[in-house]
């Protein structure tokens, strides 16, 4: 780790780890999200340090730069190509529940048709 990154991390006060469970049981997702967000400044400093580190590989620096841009500006929209101009792709998900005793009737009806 570069001295610049280590110095930026060292500037953050160290906090003792929090207990894994609260009185009511396991942490709720909102608590975990809040805890993770409390480390945003440190995480961003680490990413910037990696991006600026001349000793890091280009792939690592690029990955850090992309992570910074994604967090700051959001991920770029990914267009979906349908193969035809102006045609909107419609997806339909259908859930069919078949009872085992009805499966025999469906096979017989298919054979009679």
Image: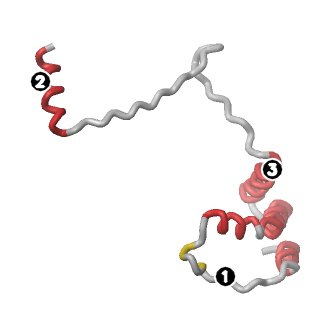
> Image quadrant for the N terminus?
bottom right
**Distance between the Cα atoms at labels 3 and 2?**
60 Å
In the shown orientation, is residue 102 left or right of residue 89?
Answer: left
State which quadrant residue 103 falls in. top left
- Give the residue at mark 1: 18
Mark 2 or 1, nearer chain start: 1
Q: Position of residue 56 (x, y in %)?
A: 77, 64
Q: Looking at the image, which residue is at 80% across and 55% down? A: 68
Q: Looking at the image, which residue is at 66% across and 68% down? A: 31
How crowded is the residue under tag 1: few (<14 C-alpha within 10 Å), some, or many (20+)?
few
Q: Report the residue that reaches farthest toward the front.
A: 24
The answer to whether the residues at label 3 and label 2 have Cβ atoms under 8 Å apart is no
For marks 3 and 2, give the one nearer the viewer.
2
Label of residue 72 in the image: none
- Could you say whether the residue bearing mark 1 is in a helix, strand or loop? loop
- Could you say whether the residue bearing mark 2 is in a helix, strand or loop? helix
- Could you say whether the residue bearing mark 3 is in a helix, strand or loop? helix
State which quadrant residue 63 falls in. bottom right
Q: Position of residue 108 (x, y in %)?
A: 11, 23
Judge by depth and name the residue closer to the eye, 29 or 85: 29
**Distance between the Cα atoms at labels 1 and 3?**
30 Å
State which quadrant residue 90 falls in. top right
Judge by depth and name the residue closer to the eye, 107 or 70: 107
Q: Looking at the image, which residue is at 56% across and 22% down? A: 89
- Give the residue at mark 2: 108
Label of residue 69 in the image: 3
Task: Specify whether residue 50 is in view.
Answer: no
Judge by depth and name the residue closer to the eye, 31 or 47: 31
- 32 w.r.t. 96: above or below: below
Q: Position of residue 110 (x, y in %)?
A: 17, 20
């Amino acid at each position: 780790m570069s001295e610049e990154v280590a110095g930026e991390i060292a500037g953050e006060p160290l906090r003792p780890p929090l207990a894994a469970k609260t009185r009511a049981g396991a942490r709720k997702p909102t608590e975990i999200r809040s805890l993770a967000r409390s480390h945003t400044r440190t995480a961003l400093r680490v990413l910037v340090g990696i991006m600026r580190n001349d000793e890091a590989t280009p792939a690592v620096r690029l990955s850090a730069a992309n992570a910074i841009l994604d967090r700051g500006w959001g991920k770029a929209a990914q267009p979906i190509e349908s193969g035809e101009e102006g045609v909107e792709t419609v997806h339909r998900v259908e859930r069919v529940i078949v009872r085992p005793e009805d499966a025999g009737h469906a096979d017989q009806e298919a054979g009679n048709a």
